[in-house]
């Protein structure tokens, strides 16, 4: 599979840095009306000082922006059928498969903060699902999310049975499909709008890359 080299997160999207965004977004200081209200709602709900770039991409359609905030608070960034750590693992891996530097950086940082080891992160960056840092259940789940991301038309009952055999139940599998598909959508939006890596994880990533090649 074609996955980004680990060093990709240490470099902003040069084209975006040189010429700006491909598509204009609504910055916080320029937001008015429904968009300003949605941004304020996000900051309050998540306790964040600033609205992330990916949400700003949806501000061109205020009703969609509001729905994305609801989705974030009710499914994406909360404990549910899948743990928050498992969701961040899926988000990081799917973002790697889709070569989305913005989302890969953001979710690698979140995964690390939620307890993901250096070895786990490096394995995901390199697409090494055989790494001992990835447990047997997570191995099967991540392989399934890769299939959903790259070849969803090939998903079969056999895939579901393989997931159930290692302990995932139907509702968790359904949620993994939702999470994988939603983050694939976000990857495409971020890449098309021209969001570059925020370099949230660049220092640790550079250290991992150096150690791996020492």
Image: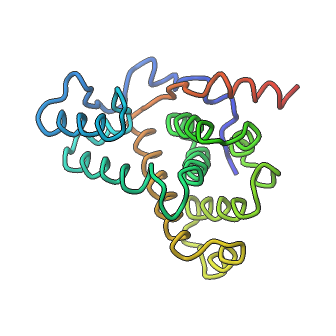
Q: Is 134 drawn above or below residue 196 in the view shown?
A: below
Instruction: Please report the residue visible at 26 percent of the width from the left and 45 percent of the height from the top.
Output: 65
Residue 145 horizontal side relative to residue 136, left or right: left
Instruction: Please report the residue visible at 60 percent of the width from the left and 79 percent of the height from the top.
Output: 156
* Closer-to-camera residue (117/23): 117
Instruction: Please report the residue visible at 72 percent of the width from the left and 48 percent of the height from the top.
Output: 127
Q: Is 198 drawn above or below residue 123 in the view shown?
A: above
Q: How many marks?
A: 0
User: Residue 137: x, y in percent?
Assistant: 71, 64
* Closer-to-camera residue (46/35): 46
User: Residue 57: x, y in percent?
Assistant: 32, 38
Query: What colour-coding does the image apply?
Result: rainbow
Image quarter hosting the C terminus: top right
Q: Residue furthest left?
A: 33
User: Residue 56: x, y in percent?
Assistant: 31, 35
- Among the 4 quarters of the image, the one containing residue 144: bottom right
Q: Residue furthest top?
A: 18
Q: Is 211 drawn above or below residue 88 in the view shown?
A: above
User: Residue 63: x, y in percent?
Assistant: 19, 49
């Amino acid at each position: 599979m074609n996955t980004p080299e680990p060093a990709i997160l240490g470099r902003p999207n040069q084209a975006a840095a040189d010429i700006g965004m491909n598509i204009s977004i609504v910055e916080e200081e320029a937001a008015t009306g429904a968009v300003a209200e949605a941004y304020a709602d996000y900051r309050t709900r998540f306790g964040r000082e600033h609205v992330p770039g990916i949400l700003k991409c949806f501000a061109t359609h205020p009703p969609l922006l509001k729905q994305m905030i609801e989705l974030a608070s009710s499914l994406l960034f909360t404990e549910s059928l899948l743990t928050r750590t498992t969701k961040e693992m899926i988000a990081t891996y799917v973002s790697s498969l889709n070569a989305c530097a913005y989302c890969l950086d953001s979710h690698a940082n979140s995964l690390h903060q939620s307890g993901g080891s250096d070895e786990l992160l490096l394995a995901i960056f390199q697409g090494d699902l055989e790494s001992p840092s990835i447990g047997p259940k997570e191995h099967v789940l991540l392989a399934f999310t890769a299939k959903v991301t790259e070849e969803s038309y090939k998903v079969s009952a056999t895939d579901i049975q393989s997931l159930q055999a290692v302990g995932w139940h139907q509702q968790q599998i359904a949620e993994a499909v939702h999470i994988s598909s939603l983050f694939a959508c976000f990857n495409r939006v971020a890449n098309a709008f021209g969001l570059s890596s925020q370099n949230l994880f660049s220092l640790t990533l550079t250290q991992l890359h150096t150690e791996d090649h020492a």
